[in-house]
């Protein structure tokens, strides 16, 4: 993708790479704005892998005034420079990250290309599942986000994805709208 962008005469959009998922971050911002009317004063908690979705979230949160807390298992931490630039609170305790947050966000524990690591990751991520107990720690109006697809029983329970706090399907719809907005802007 980077080589293509260097040689292309037209914009190249990173819809998803191992390093970043910027269109997802835009959809997340739209979902938070729909849920809360804005971003000022909101705290987002990330529980899970220090992956591409988190990287993009860490890049965008300080630009709009969001505060972010991150909890990963040891060995799965995100880029320390991204944590620093986002002024993120980092912990290895998912309960600490979730406590009082307006949004709790997670992603799959085993991404595409990591299938050989699945069993180890399932062991390493024990205690990081988003479930009813973790959701109870949120702000009273707190919501649950997941970029989908979800692996029920791993990073999230079916109750979390389909429950009253979930905004994952709004978030999925918003990916379409934000991608269209980016493309429209680039085509002008």
Image (cartoon, helix red, strand yellow):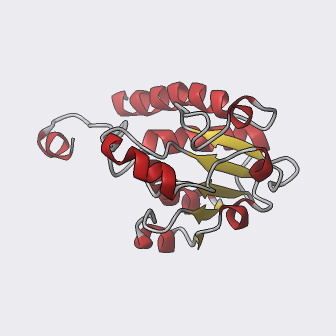
Residue pictured at 63% horizontal, 56% vertical? 127
Residue 5 in which image quadrant: top left
Residue 149: x and y in percent read 52, 30
Residue 21 in sight: yes
Residue 37 shows in this picture: no
Tell which residue pokes out farthest to the left in this image.
Answer: 7
Of the 4 image quadrants, the one containing the C terminus is: top left
Q: Is residue 151 left or right of residue 9?
A: right
In the rendered structure, the answer to whether residue 113 lies left or right of residue 121 reads left
Query: In the depicted view, which residue is nearer to us: 31 or 69?
Result: 69
Name the residue furthest right: 140
Answer with left or right where residue 139 lies relative to residue 91. Answer: right
- Identify the residue at horizontal 54%, vertical 33% (top origin): 148
Q: Quadrant of residue 27?
A: top right
Count of picture labels: 0
Relative vertical location of residue 174 with respect to residue 136 in this rendering, above or below: above
Image vertical order of residue 62 relative to residue 166, above or below? below
> Where 152 sits versus 140, above or below?
above
Where's residue 42, x and y in %?
Answer: 73, 57
Rendered location of residue 96, percent (x, y): 71, 67
Q: Residue at the location (40% across, 42% down)?
A: 111
Q: On screen, 65 above or below 167?
A: below
Considering the image in quadrants, where does the N terminus appear? top left
Front position in the image: 57 or 5? 57
Q: Residue at x 58, y 71 (%)?
A: 90
Q: Is residue 16 left or right of residue 122?
A: left
């Amino acid at each position: 993708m980077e080589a293509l962008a260097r040689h292309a005469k037209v914009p190249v959009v990173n819809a998803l790479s191992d390093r970043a998922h910027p269109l997802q971050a835009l959809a997340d911002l739209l979902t938070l704005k729909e849920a809360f009317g804005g971003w000022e004063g909101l705290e987002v908690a990330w529980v899970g892998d220090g992956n591409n979705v988190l990287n993009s979230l860490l890049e965008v949160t300080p630009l709009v005034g969001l505060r972010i807390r991150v909890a990963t298992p040891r060995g799965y931490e995100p880029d320390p420079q991204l944590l620093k630039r986002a002024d993120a609170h980092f912990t290895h305790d998912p309960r600490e990250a979730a406590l009082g947050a307006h949004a709790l966000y997670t992603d799959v524990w085993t991404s595409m290309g990591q299938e050989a690591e699945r069993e180890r990751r399932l062991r390493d991520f024990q205690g990081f599942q988003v479930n009813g107990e973790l959701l109870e720690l949120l702000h009273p109006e707190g919501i649950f986000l997941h970029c989908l697809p979800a692996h029920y029983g791993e990073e999230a329970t079916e109750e979390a994805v389909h429950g009253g706090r979930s905004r994952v399907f709004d978030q999925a719809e918003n990916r379409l709208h934000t991608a269209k907005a980016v493309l429209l802007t680039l085509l002008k």
